[in-house]
Amino acid sequence: MKGTLQGAGEGRWRLRVFVGREGGKVRHVNRNFNGNKRQAQGALAKLVADIERQQVATRLAGTLGELIDDWLDDISPRRSAYTIQEYRRIVSKTIKPALGRTRVDRLTPRQLDDFYRSLERDGLSGSSIHQHHSILHASLKRAVKWGLLATNPADRATAPRPARSSAAAPAVADVQKLIAAADDDGDNVLATAIALGAMTGARRGELCALRWSDLNRDRGVLRIARSLTVVAAKPNEGPTKTHQRRDIAIDPALASLLAARREQQERFAALAGLDLVDDPFVLSRCSDGSAPCLPDGLSNAYARLVKRLGIVTHFHELRHFSATAAIAEGIDVRTVAGRLGHADPSLTLRVYAHALEARDGQLAGILGTTVLGPVHHGPEPDQADPPAPAELEGAR
């Protein structure tokens, strides 16, 4: 690659580099530079090297679709199979049809912004569009790291911010009604799942992965160690969302409910003429407890139940119920975060800010009474009524 240096006045230079032909026309890259001749020669050499690197990167970069495929292959060993499946679903459904054939080196922030706006018009939520942006940003960041791009165009694109909303939770009476209705229907599995979700705050996949070996009756704890996902139509047991195990304390009432669930499971196996497997799943509709309930199956059964009862809620809100009930009772955020499996208590603070605000109102009343004493809105019961104005006049 050739470069030329031309003087353009005292201490001013024009750098010119031939970069090839396009459509029969000669193409050059031109730059202006201020300094002495030696400095200008150094700047020209650097410009030639930068352009050569960029041209190599351009030949290697390929299309955005190819880049994302390479990125997904690269991160797959360090992510859960379910996460990779969800990424591939998003990429194949929306990203590739819109941008997959675009050459990486020609992708612009404007194209990304137009893509996000089109997703908005299609009715996708801000959170969903932000997930698309995260995939694009991460894959393009890897392209910069690999030397395929000089800068990341997603850095200058603007995706809609996810809408912040308070975590909704069903009322205590509704949770009780749901458990009773599932029991009345003879669905002990669903009744147990609802009670576990409301009392432990465990995620849906974590509940489906529970085995009886996770219950320590002597210590009164339930260990959350795995999560169940469905990948390529097959159940897959993997780590929890935060890749951490946690022990959740259970009270005698929940211990009694789990004992009843085990008895029912053993009766069901006996009726089928089978023995339970060595370590059955707690939530299983199989006679021998060998196969777990699937997360979507659990949600669908729950959705049918709430619809029949006229209650507006979904299964994940049982997790919110557990958290808001704990905060309302004054349990500290760190303890609540540990029970929920939040890696960072600040996430608990953000998601359940509304519950903390309500608790703060209660605290204000307690502190006011402690510091200033009770506020009297009328005379004490044993206090005589104050004299009427006429009596005061006579007393003078």
Image: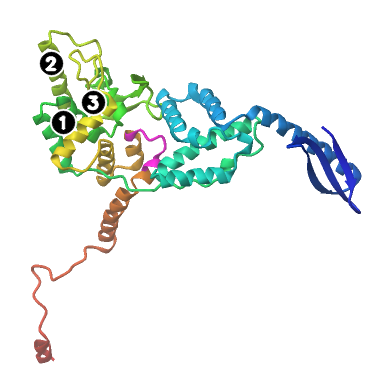
Q: Residue at 32% of width from left, 48% of height from top?
A: 166
Residue closer to the observer: 326 or 106: 106
Q: Which mark is residue 220?
A: 3
Tell me which corner region of the image, top left, top right, bottom left or bottom right, holds residue 308.
top left
* Dot 3 alpha-carbon crowd within 10 angstroms: few under 14, some 14 to 19, many 20 or more: some
* Dot 2 alpha-carbon crowd within 10 angstroms: few under 14, some 14 to 19, many 20 or more: some
Tag 3 near tag 2, CB within 8 Å: no
Q: Quadrant of the C terminus?
A: bottom left
Q: Is residue 346 magenta?
A: yes
Q: Residue at 13% of width from left, 31% of height from top?
A: 182
Q: Is residue 269 above or below residue 221?
A: above
Part of the protein shown in magenta: 340-348
Q: Which mark is residue 55?
A: none
Q: Residue at 78% of width from left, 36% of height from top?
A: 19
x, y percent for residue 309: 13, 40
Q: Is residue 210 magenta?
A: no
Mark-to-mark CA distance, 1 and 2: 23 Å
Residue type beneath disc 3: Gly
Q: Is residue 285 left or right of residue 106?
A: left
Mark nearer the viewer, 3 or 1:
1
Q: Which element is circle 1 on?
A: helix
Q: Which element is circle 2 on?
A: helix
Q: Is residue 160 left or right of residue 191?
A: right
Residue type beneath disc 1: Ala
x, y percent for residue 76: 49, 23
Q: Which residue is label 1 attached to?
A: 253
Q: Which residue is label 2 attached to?
A: 268
x, y percent for residue 236: 35, 19
Q: Is residue 395 above or below residue 310?
A: below
Mark nearer the viewer, 3 or 2:
2
